[in-house]
Amino acid sequence: MTLALLYAPGGAASGGTLGLADDLTAALRSAGAVEIDRVAAGGDLTGHLRELARRARDTGRPLLICPDNLVAHASLLWTLATDPAGRSSVLVAPDTTGDLKEDRGRVVAAEPGTGTVRFLGAMCIAPADLPLLEKVADRPDLLPALIDAGLVPVATRIRLLHAEQVGTEAELAAARAAVDAVDEDKALLRLAVKEQDDFFTTYAVSSWSPIVTKAAARLRLSPTGVTALSVLFAVAAALSFWQASRVAMIAGGILLYLGFVLDCVDGQLARYTRRFDAFGGWLDTMADRAKEYAVYAGLAAGAERIGLPYAWPLAIAAITLQTARHMTDTWYGALHDEAAARPSAQPAGGGVGARLTAASVKAQSQRGSLIYWAKRIVVFPIGERWALISVLAAVSNGRVVLGAVVGIGLFAAAYTLGLRSLRALSMRVGVLNTVDTMRHRDDGPLARSVLSRIGLRAPVVWAALFAVFAVATVALMLVGDAAAQWPVLALTVVPVVLAAAAARQRHDGPLDWLVPSALRAAEYLTVVAVGVYGSVPTAVTFLLLFTLTLRHYDLTARMEKGAPVGAGGAVMGWEGRVLVLLVAALCGYATVGVLGIVALVGGVFAYETVADWRASRAR
């Protein structure tokens, strides 16, 4: 439900004399506008903007703003008003002579004459950004003023569709002819495919998945329904891998591939039908991770079934590594967006970070080239991971597959972490300080109320990284000496206390975006150490790690998808869970401690998921 304003742009011919008002009114209504205000040439645009912004803010609605001389496919306004995460968005067209550019899907300021996009006058302002609109409503150049005030809107590009502002009857006729020349539905179906995807996804999935997307739309399937189908395929693949026969392994690879196709289709269907909701986006993210880790478990169980040792330890290494990598992906992306909102934070001069940024931009501009695909493949994204699993499973066994996933994943982690750290150092901006830091650290009552009072003044990222190093050392010592005594495991308490003591410090350092990932790694390595010391079955250790990953992906997915924050609180916090595990292990009850935390964290997660699903259905 949206409020809308149709206005006559200053310095341009009004569409009121071109007969566009009825067409645009119909397009705004199809985009979800329930009330449309009109401001003719010479009217009080500032007053109308402020009044509508106030009303929209009071009711929690977005405000859709459109010039009355815009000729465009109606679906563009629909797209503008339906951003998946409910962010502010603006309609832009390619232009290399202006002062705006697109950066990671956002519109930011550029040096005059160096821009990449042109603003077409239409925008949708999210409720959270309406105070900025009220503040700059009297400025003649509204979008530059909003960007100066801190807005970083999403770029809604016309791509295969058409939109332009017109000022004469001749321009109007030409624009309408250009709109009529496009098969809008066919273009929307193609636009539902991600524009910049991975190599395997682009050529082995997206080349034919729109056919499935169209069929799903005709069958009136929801994106969430397709997500559920993809989960079923992944579970079937995991069960096939567990059987471990050659026929079953081949079948598992095929099922995994088809499940990945459906995993792409659910997003394409959402973009094609514009059926977005915060819970659906959250569910898609959570399902992706759960499917992948269920496959790891199936591969490990299958290898164990045929007598191959070390498969479960490889699965544990894979889930730990991949989760830590995903955490860095999330927070580096947030850091990059924060830097884009602050031009002064852009890499400066000829430093390493600036050169890396320039090289990345150049590689992105060479879309389809060898270097472009090499940079996308080397990070080992989900498409490439699932392709590797499918192919290797068909010709080898679960242990070989997991070993390849871990080996290539380590290389990809070193590559991305090194480059991103250098670029982050040059950005001179923090990101964890802009959110509820202790929530995203997953601190519990012990860290919040006790340990953080210690007043540790060491850099928070180094405290977290020290925890990772120390716990990893302890885990290795235990693996190397199965008869190690309790003092070795007790050493883990020291880095845990130091990392938790930094909870209240300001996380605005250039590398502090690594803290969540480091804390996840420290906790997971503690689980491994406890498992080794307490002779916990490796499958049970994996189960706890799987449960914890759901907890931690839940934290980031809610932030990324704009889903409401759950009511489960800290669930003891990472430091509380670690200390409980250590005490349980030292008292001889490691397996009981592991299963207890599985029940607690898993129970809270399940409760919140059901509650949020019911709430989303009620809206």
Image: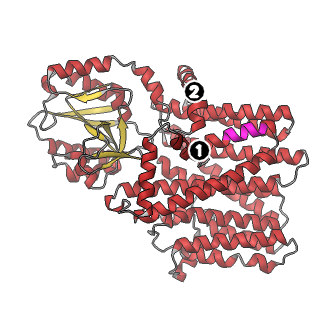
Q: Residue furthest left?
A: 42
From the image, which quarter does the N terminus lie in? top left
Question: Which circle's residue, 2 or 1, is located before the other in the chain?
Answer: 2
In this view of the protein, which residue sits in the foreground, 17 or 103? 103
Three-letter amino acid code of the residue under disc 1: Ile
Q: Is residue 602 magenta?
A: no
Q: Which residue is found at the position 87% from the left and 71% from the top?
A: 482
Residue 503 visible in the shown view:
yes
Residue 604 visible in the shown view:
no
Kindly report the secondary structure that dominates the magenta region of the rendered protein.
helix
State the separation of the CA atoms marked 2 and 1: 21 Å
In this view of the protein, which residue sits in the foreground, 584 or 112? 112
**Neighbour tally class for label 2: few under 14, some 14-19, many 20 plus, Cα within 10 Å:** many
Residue 337 is marked as none
Q: Left or right: where does residue 484 sit relative to residue 206?
A: right
Q: Which residue is found at the position 53% from the left and 35% from the top?
A: 267
Q: Is residue 386 above or below residue 337?
A: above
Residue denoted by label 2: 209
Q: Position of residue 500 (x, y in %)?
A: 58, 74
Q: Is residue 391 magenta?
A: yes
Highlighted range, magenta: 386-393
Q: Nearer the viewer, mark 2 or mark 1?
A: 1
Q: Which residue is found at the position 59% from the left and 49% from the top?
A: 379
Q: Left or right: where does residue 94 sit relative to residue 499?
A: left
Residue denoted by label 1: 377
Q: Is residue 96 above or below residue 520?
A: above
